[in-house]
Image (cartoon, rainbow, N blue to C red):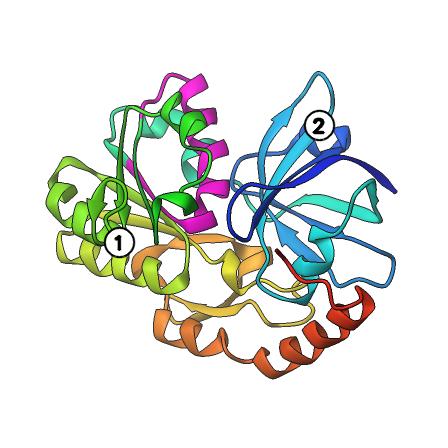
Amino acid sequence: MYKVLYNKKISVNSYEMAIIAPHIIEKFIPGQFIIIMAYEDSERIPLTVYDYDKEKGIIYLIYQVVGASTLELSNIKKEIFSISGPLGNGNEICLNPNNYREKRICYVAGGVGIAPVYPQIKYLNELGLKVDVIYGAKNVGLLLIRQKIEKVVNKIRYATDDGSFGTKGFVTDILEKYINDYDIVVAIGPVIMMKNIVDVTNKHNVKSIVSMNPLMVDGSGMCGACRCEVDGKVKFACIHGPEFPGDKVNFDLALKRMNIYKEEEKEKLDLINKKLGGKKDE
């Protein structure tokens, strides 16, 4: 069991959790993920370590309540059953920072996609690499950890669907305007957002990296849910990724796979709601 220091709501349906897990920090490279289980009989949930305190051995997670497993997780108060990791491969730029010192880098985040973006830009900032960020959400209330991001970026531009903050519109609108300022774009967020970002980068012959973590279910590769097509070959996001060259990913196939377990997830959500006495994320 692992001690939970806090598990608090930070926006409409997003939470931040702090857990004492020093063994995760020892080998963690930004871009990797962990697997947590709320209880012994819970499903495995792949999540990104978005921040950490090495001295105190604390890891910080941001997650969104989107189904049964995350609803169950949002009700945890004092401890969780297990944590495994770090898993997957680290971000290419973080692994090879010297190869990118002269490159103009932009990260594009959508919604809770800012959680895996933050540790990467923080790490690069510590190494002296300044990067730009484009961050979008439906409204200003869903833009998370803004103050933390602004401390470690060169420049950040915001987009909201309703125009409540920053540019009214989508992250692609901003990227299209400034695409010639960059040599490489890293996109992390909803699959459809990443697809649209890659459409822009491909049009301008700019290198792109995307994270296919939205496809992951159990994080081991055994379930096959995170199977995707990269450069015409079958890859598993949790083993070979989660990051891949954006121009090599078959996004149309990935979007179809996102709907595979919808019925099963609805049934599981109903069971969790009954287990919690009908309590939902409020």
Residue 15's x, y, as percent? 60, 45
Residue ID for mark 1:
162
Picture residue at 67% right of the left edge, 32% below the top: 59
In this rendering, position of residue 2 left or right of residue 214: right
Relative vertical location of residue 106 with respect to residue 219 in this rendering, above or below: above
Q: Quadrant of the C terminus?
A: bottom right
Secondary element under disc 2, as helix, strand or loop, is strand
| Residue 219 visible here | no
Instruction: Write down the quadrant of residue 48 in the picture.
Output: top right
- Amino acid residing under circle 2: Ile
Indicate whether residue 121 is drawn in magenta: yes
Magenta-drawn segment: 106-130
> Going by the picture, which residue comes out furthest to the bottom?
263
Indicate whether residue 62 is drawn in magenta: no
Picture residue at 62% right of the left edge, 27% below the top: 52
For label 1, the crowd category at 10 Å Cα-Cα, with few meaning under 14, some 14 to 19 and many 20 or more, is some
Secondary element under disc 1, as helix, strand or loop, is loop
Relative vertical location of residue 265 with respect to residue 48 in this rendering, above or below: below
The alpha-carbon separation of the residues under discs 2 and 1 comes to: 36 Å
